[in-house]
């Protein structure tokens, strides 16, 4: 607890003692009130300390010389952590896709156990936005293998999640811009899972509503800090001067602890306004029921002072109860 706070409470304590000496003849009610105030004063500094313990100590973070200079000029590391956890600029960039004309090219491969291509799909999709309505159409598609089962349902869960994120075969009208994905309402089970994926991507380092593994994503909590190296560097990313915040699993814990899921989280913030430019994510977990090994790289680009996705790279293995194990790789490039 900072010294000024401790000194302040000591002074208050002395004044209260003098007050009680003067007023002690007024009865037990004064004494009861006095002791309640004493107990509050004794434990309030501990309350402050417990709140501070939830903040990642500076001593745990490696800073380069440029960042150290920025800290001296007023940059708050704790604020930067909060920005990374709760920032909405990455979500807004994806939400901006609902209100513009664009084209995306999607190159996806499904691999078997021997890492050979089991199925692939290359497609080009164009969206036209006009009169507050967006309509998507598939311009070209090249496919090999089966992407649907005998009942006509999506065969691969990862592909189904992706299609629900980017593609809509029907015209959508009257949408309003959103600044926070937490306001979204999910009706189906798939949409609920998609919401959990969004939390992992848009609010990294916070617990996720997933059975068995949800709390293991909270990489800034005190109980998880010993397992990671934290660093902040100044780098040029896509022509922008950025603060790059890296959280990387310590080598000595690699593949040895099941309570570690996030292996790498790197976020590049534009120095001038903390706009996210890029996010790199690697997650791995080998549990009895759930197994995953997923790497993602998302890059944004600015057009007319608005940010949009530029490229998404995904390389992931996923196995969950009632779901067949699948390894999927894809790269999606956006053109505006």
Image (cartoon, rainbow, N blue to C red):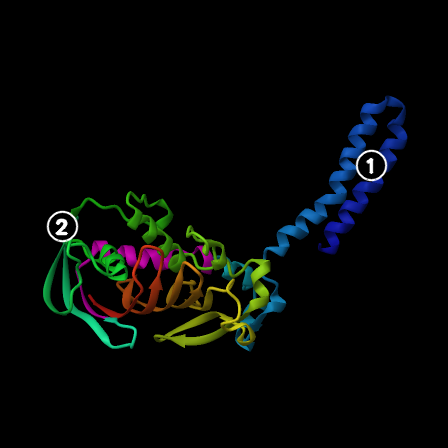
Give me the residue at 56% from left, 58% from top. 221
> Magenta region: which residues?
84-109
In the displayed orientation, state which residue is furthest to the top.
26
Q: CA distance from mark 1 to mark 2?
A: 71 Å
Residue 16: mark in rendering: 1
| Mark 1 or 2, nearer chain start | 1
Residue in view at x 74 percent, y 53 percent: 4
Is residue 219 something that shows in the picture? yes
Q: Up-down: is 114 above or below 56?
A: below
Query: In the rendered view of the protein, which quadrant contains the C terminus?
Result: bottom left
On whether residue 193 falls in the magenta region, the answer is no
Quadrant of the image containing the N terminus: bottom right
| Rendering coords of residue 227 (x, y %) | 56, 68
Q: Indicate the secondary structure of the residue bearing disc 2.
A: loop
Identify the image quadrant of residue 307: bottom left
**Residue 40: % across, % down:** 73, 39
In the rendered structure, the answer to whether residue 176 lies left or right of residue 289 reads left
Front label number (1 vs 2) = 2
Residue denoted by label 2 = 170
Q: Position of residue 215 (x, y in %)?
A: 49, 54
From the viewer's side, name the closer residue of 121 and 140: 121
């Amino acid at each position: 607890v900072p010294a000024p706070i401790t000194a302040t409470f000591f002074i208050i304590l002395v004044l209260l003692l003098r007050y009680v000496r003067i007023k002690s003849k007024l009865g037990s009610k004064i004494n009861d009130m006095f002791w309640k105030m004493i107990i509050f004063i004794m434990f309030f500094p501990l309350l402050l300390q417990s709140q501070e313990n939830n903040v990642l100590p500076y001593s745990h973070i490696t800073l380069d010389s440029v960042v150290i200079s920025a800290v001296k000029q007023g940059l708050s590391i704790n604020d930067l952590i909060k920005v990374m956890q709760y920032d909405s600029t990455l979500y807004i960039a994806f939400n901006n896709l609902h209100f513009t004309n664009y084209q995306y090219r999607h190159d996806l491969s499904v691999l078997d156990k021997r890492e050979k291509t089991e199925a692939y799909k290359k497609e080009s999709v164009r969206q036209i936005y006009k009169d507050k309505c967006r309509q998507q159409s598939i311009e070209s598609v090249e496919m090999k293998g089966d992407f649907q089962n005998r009942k006509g349902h999506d065969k691969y869960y990862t592909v189904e999640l992706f299609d629900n994120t980017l593609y809509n075969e029907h015209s959508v009208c009257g949408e309003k811009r959103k600044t926070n994905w937490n306001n979204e309402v999910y009706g189906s089970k798939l949409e609920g899972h998609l919401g959990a994926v969004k939390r992992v991507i848009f609010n990294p380092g916070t617990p996720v509503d997933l059975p068995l593994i949800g709390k293991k994503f909270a990489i800034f909590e005190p109980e998880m800090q010993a397992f990671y190296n934290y660093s902040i560097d100044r780098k040029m990313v896509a022509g922008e001067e950025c603060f790059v915040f890296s959280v990387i699993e310590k080598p000595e814990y690699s593949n040895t602890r099941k309570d570690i899921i996030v292996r790498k989280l790197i976020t590049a913030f534009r120095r001038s306004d903390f706009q996210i430019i890029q996010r790199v994510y690697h997650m791995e977990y080998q549990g009895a029921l759930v197994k995953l090994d997923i790497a993602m790289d998302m890059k944004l680009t600015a057009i007319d002072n608005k940010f949009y996705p530029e490229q998404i790279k995904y390389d992931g293995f996923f196995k969950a109860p009632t779901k067949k194990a699948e390894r999927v790789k894809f790269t999606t490039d956006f053109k505006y």
